[in-house]
Image (cartoon, rainbow, N blue to C red):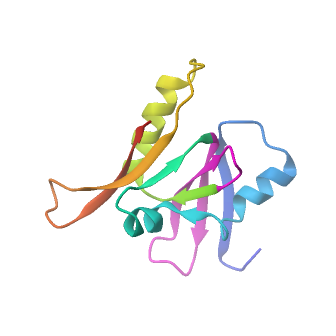
Amino acid sequence: MRAGYSVTVDECSKELSHKERVKLMDTTSAIRIDKVTSDNGEGVLIDPDYYAVISVHNENSDDKDYNNYLIVDKDGTRYLTGSESFWSAFMDIMEEMKDSDEEFKIRAYRMDSKNRPGKQFITCEII
């Protein structure tokens, strides 16, 4: 553990083994949704297997305590974001689909903000 930096898994949509929990706490190889949605106007398709809320404490950051959201694709790819707008839309979809056996994917993308002209936010939709 680095001095002044700690990560905990606060919530996960599935029961985790010890190894899985440690893997979730190391997000260095996760694909940043913020980056792939800015590089690609189409957004990115995710086939969610499970998801987790990760709390970060970082003494070297302006915002010392914050959440990251991790979505693990069925192919094992891990996607990470701190976007509250994405997370809210994602959780709305997951809540509605929790008792369904229908196949679906999530498309994460950027959208122009109506409240902040010239700015964008990250959101998602079901595919």
Q: Which residues are magenta?
A: 49-77
Which residue sits at x=47%, y=24%? 96
Measured as percent of width and height from the top left, residue 37 is found at 41, 62
Which residue sits at x=62%, y=46%? 52
Q: Quadrant of residue 59?
A: bottom right
Magenta run includes residue 20: no
Q: Is residue 92 toward the left or the right of residue 52 in the image?
A: left
Work out whether 126 lies above or below 65.
Answer: above
Q: Quadrant of residue 11?
A: top right
Q: Is residue 48 toward the left or the right of residue 86 in the image?
A: right
Q: Quadrant of the N terminus?
A: bottom right
Which residue sits at x=71%, y=60%? 25
Q: Nearer the viewer, residue 19 or 72?
A: 72
Measured as percent of width and height from the top left, residue 36 is found at 46, 65
Q: Nearer the viewer, residue 49 or 64?
A: 49
Magenta run includes residue 67: yes
Which residue sits at x=53%, y=32%? 104
Q: Quadrant of the C terminus?
A: top left
Q: Is residue 118 toward the left or the right of residue 92 in the image?
A: left
Numbered disc total: 0
Measured as percent of width and height from the top left, residue 107 is found at 44, 46
Work out whether 86 lies above or below 57.
Answer: above
In the orientation shown, which residue stands out farthest toward the right?
18
Q: Nearer the viewer, residue 119 or 44?
A: 44
Work out whether 95 lies above or below 64.
Answer: above
What secondary structure is the magenta-colored segment mainly? strand
